[in-house]
Protein backbone atom coordinates (compact mmCIF):
# COMPACT_ATOMS: atom_id res chain seq x y z
CA UNK A 1 0.00 0.00 0.00
CA UNK A 2 1.29 3.45 -0.91
CA UNK A 3 2.16 5.76 1.96
CA UNK A 4 0.13 8.99 2.13
CA UNK A 5 2.34 12.10 2.00
CA UNK A 6 1.14 15.38 3.51
CA UNK A 7 2.05 18.90 2.43
CA UNK A 8 3.40 21.46 4.88
CA UNK A 9 0.01 23.21 4.87
CA UNK A 10 -1.73 19.98 5.85
CA UNK A 11 0.79 19.26 8.62
CA UNK A 12 0.56 22.84 9.93
CA UNK A 13 -3.23 22.59 10.05
CA UNK A 14 -3.20 19.09 11.56
CA UNK A 15 -0.71 19.98 14.33
CA UNK A 16 -2.00 23.55 14.75
CA UNK A 17 1.53 24.92 14.32
CA UNK A 18 3.02 27.60 12.11
CA UNK A 19 5.04 26.81 9.01
CA UNK A 20 8.19 28.18 10.68
CA UNK A 21 7.76 25.82 13.63
CA UNK A 22 7.45 22.89 11.24
CA UNK A 23 10.61 23.98 9.37
CA UNK A 24 12.49 24.18 12.69
CA UNK A 25 11.24 20.70 13.62
CA UNK A 26 12.62 19.39 10.32
CA UNK A 27 16.00 21.06 10.95
CA UNK A 28 16.20 19.59 14.45
CA UNK A 29 15.27 16.15 13.14
CA UNK A 30 12.12 15.96 15.25
CA UNK A 31 9.81 15.39 12.30
CA UNK A 32 10.64 13.14 9.36
CA UNK A 33 10.19 14.83 5.99
CA UNK A 34 11.08 14.19 2.37
CA UNK A 35 11.94 16.92 -0.12
CA UNK A 36 10.29 16.30 -3.50
CA UNK A 37 10.76 18.85 -6.28
CA UNK A 38 11.90 21.49 -3.79
CA UNK A 39 8.82 20.99 -1.58
CA UNK A 40 8.60 19.22 1.75
CA UNK A 41 6.37 16.16 2.09
CA UNK A 42 5.60 14.35 5.33
CA UNK A 43 4.64 10.70 5.75
CA UNK A 44 1.30 10.68 7.56
CA UNK A 45 2.38 7.91 9.93
CA UNK A 46 5.49 9.93 10.93
CA UNK A 47 3.35 12.96 11.78
CA UNK A 48 0.92 10.82 13.78
CA UNK A 49 3.82 9.09 15.58
CA UNK A 50 5.36 12.49 16.48
CA UNK A 51 1.99 13.66 17.80
CA UNK A 52 1.55 10.49 19.88
CA UNK A 53 5.11 10.72 21.23
CA UNK A 54 4.70 14.37 22.19
CA UNK A 55 1.56 13.71 24.22
CA UNK A 56 2.01 13.14 27.96
CA UNK A 57 2.34 9.45 28.70
CA UNK A 58 0.69 9.69 32.08
CA UNK A 59 -2.50 11.49 32.87
CA UNK A 60 -1.72 14.90 34.34
CA UNK A 61 -4.40 16.49 36.42
CA UNK A 62 -3.36 19.86 37.82
CA UNK A 63 -4.16 20.42 41.47
CA UNK A 64 -6.86 22.92 42.21
CA UNK A 65 -4.95 26.13 42.87
CA UNK A 66 -7.98 28.35 42.64
CA UNK A 67 -10.71 28.26 45.23
CA UNK A 68 -14.16 29.54 44.48
CA UNK A 69 -14.29 33.29 44.99
CA UNK A 70 -10.57 33.67 45.67
CA UNK A 71 -7.67 33.63 43.26
CA UNK A 72 -4.20 33.18 44.64
CA UNK A 73 -1.31 30.88 45.37
CA UNK A 74 -1.43 29.19 48.74
CA UNK A 75 1.70 28.00 50.53
CA UNK A 76 0.25 24.54 50.94
CA UNK A 77 -0.31 24.24 47.18
CA UNK A 78 3.27 25.04 46.21
CA UNK A 79 4.61 21.48 46.68
CA UNK A 80 1.74 20.15 44.56
CA UNK A 81 2.46 22.81 41.93
CA UNK A 82 6.14 21.87 41.82
CA UNK A 83 5.22 18.19 41.44
CA UNK A 84 2.83 19.07 38.62
CA UNK A 85 5.57 21.07 36.86
CA UNK A 86 8.05 18.21 37.30
CA UNK A 87 5.50 15.81 35.75
CA UNK A 88 5.11 18.12 32.75
CA UNK A 89 8.87 18.48 32.38
CA UNK A 90 9.31 14.70 32.46
CA UNK A 91 6.67 14.11 29.80
CA UNK A 92 7.20 17.17 27.59
CA UNK A 93 10.35 19.10 28.58
CA UNK A 94 10.51 21.37 25.53
CA UNK A 95 7.46 23.44 26.44
CA UNK A 96 5.63 24.41 29.58
CA UNK A 97 2.47 26.50 29.58
CA UNK A 98 1.43 28.51 32.60
CA UNK A 99 -1.97 30.14 32.63
CA UNK A 100 -2.68 33.38 34.45
CA UNK A 101 -5.50 35.94 34.57
CA UNK A 102 -5.47 39.42 33.07
CA UNK A 103 -3.90 42.03 35.32
CA UNK A 104 -2.09 39.47 37.44
CA UNK A 105 1.67 39.26 37.48
CA UNK A 106 2.69 35.66 37.18
CA UNK A 107 5.96 35.69 39.05
CA UNK A 108 7.99 38.39 40.74
CA UNK A 109 11.20 36.48 40.30
CA UNK A 110 12.34 33.26 38.63
CA UNK A 111 15.31 31.18 39.45
CA UNK A 112 16.71 28.55 37.15
CA UNK A 113 18.39 25.76 39.05
CA UNK A 114 20.51 23.08 37.35
CA UNK A 115 18.39 19.98 37.14
CA UNK A 116 18.34 16.38 36.11
CA UNK A 117 15.54 17.14 33.63
CA UNK A 118 17.86 17.65 30.63
CA UNK A 119 18.31 21.37 31.19
CA UNK A 120 14.65 22.18 31.66
CA UNK A 121 13.51 24.68 34.22
CA UNK A 122 12.65 22.58 37.23
CA UNK A 123 12.42 24.97 40.13
CA UNK A 124 10.46 28.16 40.57
CA UNK A 125 11.08 30.56 43.38
CA UNK A 126 9.21 33.54 44.78
CA UNK A 127 5.75 32.83 43.45
CA UNK A 128 3.84 36.05 43.75
CA UNK A 129 0.23 36.06 44.86
CA UNK A 130 -2.13 37.05 42.10
CA UNK A 131 -4.50 39.95 42.78
CA UNK A 132 -8.23 39.30 42.80
CA UNK A 133 -8.98 42.31 40.58
CA UNK A 134 -9.60 41.76 36.89
CA UNK A 135 -10.15 38.08 35.98
CA UNK A 136 -11.90 38.54 32.66
CA UNK A 137 -9.04 37.44 30.40
CA UNK A 138 -6.30 34.85 30.18
CA UNK A 139 -2.86 34.66 28.68
CA UNK A 140 -0.38 31.88 28.34
CA UNK A 141 3.33 32.26 28.96
CA UNK A 142 5.29 29.70 27.00
CA UNK A 143 8.69 28.73 28.33
CA UNK A 144 10.85 27.26 25.61
CA UNK A 145 14.52 26.51 24.99
CA UNK A 146 15.42 30.19 24.59
CA UNK A 147 14.05 30.92 28.06
CA UNK A 148 15.78 27.92 29.57
CA UNK A 149 19.14 28.95 28.13
CA UNK A 150 19.49 32.48 29.40
CA UNK A 151 16.80 34.72 27.96
CA UNK A 152 15.38 36.71 30.84
CA UNK A 153 11.79 36.17 31.78
CA UNK A 154 11.56 39.77 32.88
CA UNK A 155 11.62 40.86 29.22
CA UNK A 156 9.05 38.22 28.28
CA UNK A 157 6.83 39.28 31.17
CA UNK A 158 7.04 42.94 30.07
CA UNK A 159 6.10 41.91 26.53
CA UNK A 160 3.08 40.04 27.90
CA UNK A 161 2.09 43.02 30.03
CA UNK A 162 2.32 45.30 26.97
CA UNK A 163 0.11 42.93 24.99
CA UNK A 164 -2.37 42.81 27.85
CA UNK A 165 -2.43 46.63 27.99
CA UNK A 166 -3.25 46.74 24.27
CA UNK A 167 -6.13 44.30 24.74
CA UNK A 168 -7.65 46.35 27.56
Image: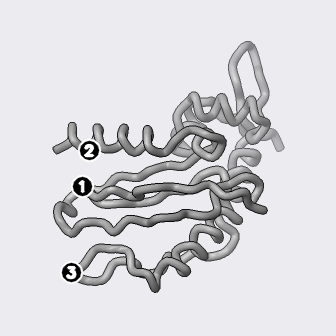
| Nearest to N terminus: mark 2 or mark 1 | 1
- Please report the residue visible at 40 percent of the width from the left and 56 percent of the height from the top: 108
Residue pushed farthest right?
A: 1
3 or 1: mark nearer the eye: 1
Q: Residue at x 57, y 45 (%)?
A: 15
Q: Is residue 122 left or right of residue 119?
A: left
The residue that appears at 65% across and 29% down in the rendered structure is 23
Using the numbered discs, state the Cα–Cα distance from disc 3 to disc 1 in whole angstroms: 17 Å
Q: Position of residue 88 (x, y in %)?
A: 62, 65
Compared with 39, 137 (above or below) is below
Q: Badge 1 local density, few (<14 within 10 Å), some, or many (20+)?
A: many
Q: Secondary structure at mark 2?
A: helix
Q: Secondary structure at mark 3?
A: loop
* Label 2 sits on residue: 164
* C-alpha span from label 2 to label 1: 8 Å
Decide if residue 104 is on the left or right side of residue 51. left
Q: Residue 127, located in which quarter of the rendered image?
A: bottom left
Amino acid sequence: MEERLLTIDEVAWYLQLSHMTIYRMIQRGELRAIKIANQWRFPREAVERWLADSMPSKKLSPPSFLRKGKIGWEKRYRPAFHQFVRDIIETKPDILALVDRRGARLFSEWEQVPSDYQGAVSYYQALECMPEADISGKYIALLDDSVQHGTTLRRKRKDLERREALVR
